[in-house]
């Protein structure tokens, strides 16, 4: 993050460099919270790529998530494992919904999550690439936690 240390909460367990390293190395989905017109949040799990100070995800243009983000780009997010030792990164930001770049993003996501391009899933997703949005999530703040020390034997 270019001079983005100011978006890191003082209570964050990790430094900016540690957060970036965690986000680039973790191959778990990002949980994205979007708000509906009724104000009720919905959490969606998405593969992500973290680069150039932002998260990049894909979603189908007809998805409920896409409709919600087009109406309200404010979001919350978290990248955290469900197993010990518990650690992760969370924050809030704004989503920019982009029409272009889905094929390149999907290819990068397959590589990141070790999905063979010849699998049914990869072929099916690529067959819909023209109907996918690229979601660029720009964090407004980030924080992290790490309970490894508490969980050590």
Image: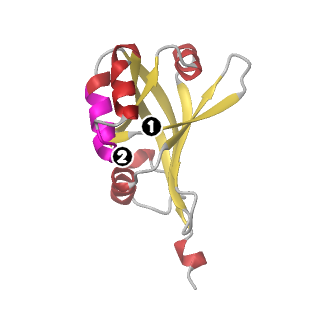
The x, y position of residue 142, in whole percent, is 48, 47
Determine contact: label 2, label 1, CB under 8 Å: no
- Distance between mark 2 and mark 1 Cα atoms: 22 Å
In what element is the residue under mark 2? loop
Q: Report whether 98 appears left or right of 32.
A: left
The residue that label 1 is drawn on is: 139
Q: Report whether 121 appears left or right of 52.
A: right
The x, y position of residue 117, in whole percent, is 28, 36
Of the two numbered discs 2 and 1 in the rendering, the one whose residue sits closer to the viewer: 2
Q: Is residue 105 above or below residue 72?
A: below
Q: Is residue 25 above or below residue 124?
A: below
Q: Point out the tag, 2 or 1, that comes first from the N-terminus.
A: 2
The N terminus - image quarter? top left
Q: Nearer the viewer, residue 53 or 64?
A: 64
Query: The magenta stretch spans which residues?
Result: 104-116
In the picture, the disc for residue 128 is none
In the picture, the disc for residue 113 is 2
Q: Is residue 59 above or below residue 119?
A: above
Mark 1: few/some/many CA within 10 Å (<14, 14-19, 20+): many
Mark 2: few/some/many CA within 10 Å (<14, 14-19, 20+): some
The x, y position of residue 94, in whole percent, is 48, 28
Quadrant for residue 43, please give it: top right
Q: Nearer the viewer, residue 28 or 135?
A: 28
- Residue 108 within the segment the image draws in magenta: yes
Q: Nearer the viewer, residue 68 or 108?
A: 108
In what element is the residue under mark 1? strand
Task: Give the main secondary structure, helix, strand or loop, of the magenta stretch.
Answer: helix
């Amino acid at each position: 993050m270019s001079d983005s240390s100011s978006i890191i909460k003082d209570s964050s367990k990790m430094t900016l460099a540690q957060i970036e390293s965690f986000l680039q190395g973790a191959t778990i989905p990002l949980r994205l919270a979007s708000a509906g017109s009724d104000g009720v949040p919905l959490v969606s799990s998405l593969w992500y790529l973290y680069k150039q100070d932002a998260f990049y995800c894909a979603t189908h243009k007809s998805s409920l998530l896409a409709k919600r983000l087009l109406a309200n780009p404010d979001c919350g997010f978290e990248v955290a494992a469900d197993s010990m030792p518990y650690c992760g990164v969370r924050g809030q930001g704004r989503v920019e919904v982009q029409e272009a770049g889905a094929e390149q993003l999907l290819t990068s996501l397959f590589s990141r999550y070790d999905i063979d391009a010849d699998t049914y899933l990869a072929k099916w997703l690529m067959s819909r690439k023209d109907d996918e949005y690229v979601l660029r999530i720009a964090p407004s703040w980030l924080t992290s936690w790490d309970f490894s020390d508490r969980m050590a034997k």
